[in-house]
Image (spheres, coloured by chain):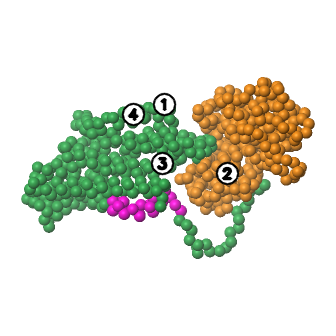
Chain colours: A green, B orange
Amino acid sequence: MAAVAPLPQPDRDVAAYEMPEQATLLGDAWRRIRRNRLALVGGAIIVLLFVTALVSIVWTPYPVWLQAVGPTYQPPSPHHPLGLDQAGRDILSRIMGGALITAEVGVGSAIIVSLIGIPLGLMAGFYRGAVDTTISFFINIWYGIPDLLVALILVFVLSDALHLIPRGVFVIIVAFSLTRWMDVARLVRGQALALREREFVEAARMSGARDFALLFRHIFPNALGPIIVQATFAIPAAVLFEAFLSFLGLGLPSPTPSWGAMAADGYHGMDFAPHIVLAPTIALSVTLMAFNWVGDGLRDAFDPRMRR
Amino acid sequence: MTAVDGVSFNVDRGEVVGIVGESGSGKTMTALSILRLVPEPGQITNGRILYGDRDVVHMSDEEIREFRGNEVAMIFQDPMTSLNPVLRVGFQVEEAMAAHQRFTRTQARERVAPLLTRVRIPAAEQRVRDYPHQFSGGMRQRAMIAMGVSNEPSLLIADEPTTALDVTVQASIIELVRDLSGELGASVILITHNMALIASLCQRVIVMYAGRIVEQGPTRAIFKNPQHPYTWSLLRSIPRVDERTKEKLISIRGLPPDLSKPPPGCKFHPRCRFRVDRCFTEEPSLEEVEPGHLARCWVLMRNVEAPEAAQ
C-alpha cells in the first residue's frame, strides 16, 4: 500500500480560533511562579542587584577605592546617602561595587558547582555499580570534611603559597565549588537513578542511542527542574561564604568593595558610626533572602505534584 | 531461575511471526534477548542469536548499539510512557536516526515529517513541533512506529503494540505495522496474547508456555489443528464469530507455574485436561507432527477423541 497523501486542507481562515498555548517546562514554571508573591519580590530584588552590578562597572557616584571624599565616619547625608566609612570612602559607591562582586561569586559558583555535580551525579546514577560506589564514596567523604576549613586552605595554597590563581573572586568560586559540589551531585544521582528506569530511556536504548545521548537528551532534561532549584540555592550559600571569608580578612583583598570586608571595616566604630556596618549587612541579608525566596518559589513551580 | 529455556526459532526475510502466551511465559524476555537487553540481574547464559551469520550474543558493545534500532527495531506496549515527555516528537524521531550512520543530521531532520506522514499522522509538518502530551495514545504509537522504521530495519519486534490502545485504534495500528513492514520488506515478530491479531497478521505462530516453545507452526495449521493441549485450550477459550457458535468456551484451570520452582515433567501437566502418567515425570521434546508444525506433548490432540468432553 502506498503512503497516504496528506489530507486536502480546506481553504478557510483558522485565525478565528485561538490555539491553546504550548506549555514548556520553563513557561509552565513561569506561569506558576507569577502567582507566588514572595518569589516575585525576591526576583525583583535580584534584578535590582544585577542591574546595580552592571551599572557599577561603568559608573558609581565616586570611585569605590577613593578615600577621603569627605570626613571619615560621616553619617548619611544628602551628598552621600549611605555616609562615608572609616577611610572616608563613599559607602553607596562601595555597596554598588559589592553588588558586582556578589553577583560574580553567586553566579560563578552556581555554574561551577553544576559543572562538577551534574556530570558526576549523572554518571553515578546512570552506570550504577562500581562507578556509583566510587562517586558516592567521594560524596560522603566530602560531606565529612569541614568545608570552610578546606576552602580557607585552598585559598591560601592556590593564591598565597603557589600563586596559581590571584587572590580574587575566582579563587573564592573555586574554593566554594570544590567543597560544595556534593549537593548537586547527590540530587542529580537520585534523579538519574529514577529516570534511567523510565520506559522512554529504555526505548531510546533499544533504538541504539549512545550513552551520551541517553544521559544528556533523555535523563538530564527531565531532571532540569530540580537542578535549577538546587543551583539557585547554591547562589546565596556562595555569597554568604564570600562575605564570611572577607569579613575574616581571608577573602578579597582591600580595597575590593566586598560586603563582608566592608562590615569588618566598620565594626570597630559600631557604637558611634553604625551605618558603616549596617549598609553592607542589610544589603547582604536582603540579597540572601531574595535568592532563598526565589529558590523556594522555583521549587514549588517545578514540582508537578504542587500543580494548582 | 530460568525464564526462557531452549527457545529456538527462525524468522525468514519478510515473514511475520507471532509469539503468543500468557503473561510471564517468556515472550518479552525472548524479544529482549534478541537485542541483548535482558533487564538486570538477568543474563543470557547459553545459546546463540543469529542475525544473518552474526551472533548477537558475542557482538561488541559498539556493534550491538549499532545493531539496535538500525537492523532490529522494537515497538512497545505502552506509547504513553515510551516517549520522552520533555522533548519534541519530531526531535525524538530525528534522534533515532542520528544514533546511527545511515543518515546525516540534515537528512535525518528532513526525513522526520515525511516519516510522520507515512505513519498517517495528519498535518505532520506542524506536529513535529509538538510535545508527546499533545498527542493521543494512537498518535504516540504511530510516532513510536515512525521511530522504529526510521532506519529501515529488516526486523521489527512489536511487543503487544495495541494492548494499551483503544479498540478503535488497534486495527489501524496493526494495519500500519503490516503495510510498513511490507513496504520495507522487513520481517516482523509480533508478541501478543491476542489470538485474533495473530490470525489476521501472522504467517507463522509460536506458542510459549513457562519459558518454552510448546507449539510452533503455520498459522493455518495451528488454528485448524492445534496439537498441544495448551494451544487447543487457548483457542477454545475465545468466542468465535465465524463457526461452531454453539460450542462451550473452555477455561484453563489454575495459574502458570512459578518458574523458580517449575513442576517436574511437562510444565503444563498440572493444568492439562489430557495428561497421562508420563507427563508427570518426563518432559517431552519439541517434535514435528507434520511438516513445519512442531509440538511439545506426549499426547497430541489428534490422538484425543472428543476433547470437549474431557474433564
Dot 3 surroundings within 10 Å: few (below 14), some, or many (20 or more)? many
* Contact check, label 3 and label 2, Cβ < 8 Å: no
* Contact check, label 4 and label 1, Cβ < 8 Å: no
Res. B152 in view: no
Q: Earlier in the sequence, mark 4 or mark 1?
A: 1
Dot 2 surroundings within 10 Å: few (below 14), some, or many (20 or more)? some
The answer to which quarter of the image holds residue A78 is bottom left
| Secondary structure beneath label 3 | loop
| Residue picked out by circle 2 | B164
Q: Position of residue B192 (x, y in %)?
A: 73, 44
Q: Earlier in the sequence, mark 4 or mark 3?
A: 4
Number of the label disc, if any, that sits on residue A223: 3
Q: Chain of mark 2?
A: B
Q: Position of residue A293 (x, y in %)?
A: 34, 56
In the rendered structure, which segment of residues is drawn in magenta?
Answer: A22-44
| Residue picked out by circle 1 | A130
* Contact check, label 1 and label 3, Cβ < 8 Å: no
Dot 4 surroundings within 10 Å: few (below 14), some, or many (20 or more)? few
* Three-letter residue code for mark 2: Ala
Q: CA distance from mark 4 to mark 2?
A: 44 Å
Q: CA distance from mark 3 to mark 2?
A: 27 Å
* Contact check, label 4 and label 2, Cβ < 8 Å: no
Decide which of B285, B65 is in the foreground and name it.
B285
* Three-letter residue code for mark 4: Phe
